[in-house]
Image (tube, helix red, strand yellow):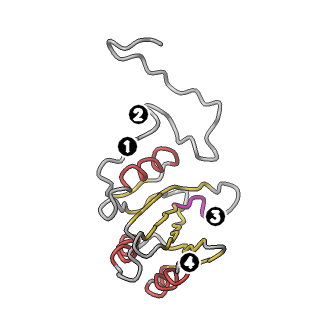
């Protein structure tokens, strides 16, 4: 059924779809960033698709492999229809940002923060876009391919009343 879901989605958003593939149950659409919120709303609200669950939002850094450098990857699942769909959104290095989907899926709240923290992807309109895994003073984004592994981070003194251990 996932292939039918992919076909329904791509038929509705032909102008936004860059590429698709359906290999071994891996149904994926690569889409342009504009109208992302409209596309995700359609995935959730269309009765034939009914993607009630956004199970993951992550990013990939293709530095030195392909352009554009980044892709944000969304994994959707329909509990009622038992099908899955992956949406990928390519982003240029100079402006790695796209609209937040937190207003549609509350599960995106922490997942978008994680992609922001680890890759530096900015989710426009996110209600609380700040680091979630690294501390606030951490410099850089540790899952970017050009992050210097030997980079020295600022030391954070212990808070009053906190042990030095």
Residue to which mark 2 is pinned: 136
Left-right relation of 104 to 163: left
Whether residue 124 is in magenta: the answer is: no
Q: Residue 164's x, y, as percent? A: 45, 11
Left-right relation of 11 to 123: right
What residue is rendered at 34% in x and 62% in y?
105
Residue furthest right as drawn: 65
Q: 106 or 67, which is in the foreground?
A: 106
Mark 1 or mark 2: which comes first in sequence? 1
Residue to which mark 1 is pinned: 130
Q: What element does badge 1 sit on? A: loop
Q: What element does badge 2 sit on? A: loop
Q: 34 or 56, which is in the foreground?
A: 56
Find residue 135 and report its image quarter: top left
Q: Give the range drawn in magenta.
A: 67-72
Residue to which mark 3 is pinned: 67
What residue is rendered at 65% in x and 54% in y?
63
Residue to which mark 4 is pinned: 18
How far apart, in angstroms, are the residues tagged by discs 2 and 3? 30 Å
């Amino acid at each position: 059924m996932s292939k039918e879901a992919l076909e329904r989605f791509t038929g509705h958003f032909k102008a936004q779809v860059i590429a698709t593939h359906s290999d071994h149950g891996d149904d994926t659409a690569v889409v342009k960033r504009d109208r992302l919120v409209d596309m995700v709303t359609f995935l959730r609200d269309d009765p034939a698709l009914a993607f009630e669950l956004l199970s993951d939002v992550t990013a990939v850094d293709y530095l030195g492999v392909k352009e554009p450098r980044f892709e944000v990857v969304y994994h959707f699942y329909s509990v009622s229809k038992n099908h899955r769909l992956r949406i990928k959104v390519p982003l240029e290095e100079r402006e790695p940002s796209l609209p937040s989907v937190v207003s549609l899926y509350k599960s995106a709240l922490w997942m978008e923060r994680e992609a922001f923290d680890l890759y530096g992807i900015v989710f426009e309109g996110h209600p609380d876009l700040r680091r979630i895994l690294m501390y606030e003073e951490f410099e850089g984004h540790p899952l970017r391919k050009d992050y210097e592994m030997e980079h020295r981070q600022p030391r954070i003194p212990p808070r009053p009343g906190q042990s030095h251990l």
